[in-house]
Amino acid sequence: MGPILYLDIDGVLARRQPLPPFELDKALPARLAEDLNCGAIRRLDPVLVNEVVHGFDARACQLIRQICEECSAGIIITSSWRHVFSPQELKAILSIVGLGDYVLGSVPGGISRPEVIHASLEELGTADFAVVDDMDMRHDFGVRSVVPEAVFDEVCARKVRRLFKIYGH
């Protein structure tokens, strides 16, 4: 198993700002499902699909994808989105931005985010990980906590690559 990227969505892939204005394209899920060869996108709400396309930061998604490819990393979703969407829906959502193939799953709900990440690490038996979240978890994960200023950027990407290089990749 490669390194694990525990990944938040809001404040990491999607900026915490109002979405830019856009015209709703109800046919977008069907087009993306065909273009990306991911039938699960077709089953997502058209409003959600449009919001992902217009609200996720393309560069942030590209940087995460590059890290996953370069380091053979997998993604485990820690975002509060896991309380709203099933693991299959989260994978389809991230497929829209080119990250679906790297999604291994999501942490369960219930207890605090740091606690579910610790439980996941124990279950997986890995020490090769980074936690990328706009919530500062340095108290819980030390240098393995990567906190973007506005969205995941080149500074964050360098830190994650360095962590994976130092701690096992």
Image (tube, rainbow, N blue to C red):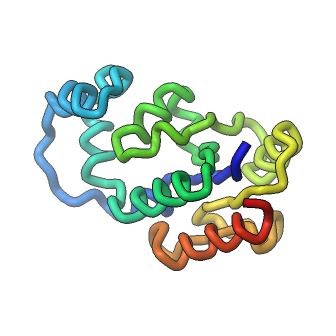
Which residue is painted at 11% across and 45% down in the image? 23
State left or right for residue 30 relative to residue 155: left
* Residue toward you, 20 or 141: 141
Picture coordinates of residue 117, whole percent (x, y): 77, 48
Question: Residue 93 vs residue 131: left or right?
Answer: left
How many numbered marks are there?
0
Expressed as whole percent of the image width and height from the top left, the position of residue 141 reads 80, 65
**Residue at (16% x, 56% y) in the render:** 21
| Quadrant position of the N terminus in the picture | top right
Position of 20 with respect to 39 (left or right) is left
Residue 116 image offset from top left, x and y in percent: 78, 44
Percent coordinates x, y for residue 107 in the rendering? 69, 38
For this rendering, which residue is in front, 22 or 57?
57
Where 169 falls versus 149 (above or below)? above
The image quadrant that residue 62 belongs to is bottom left
Tell me what residue is drawn at x 72 percent, y 60 percent: 169
Vertical arrangement, residue 3 with respect to residue 135, above or below: above
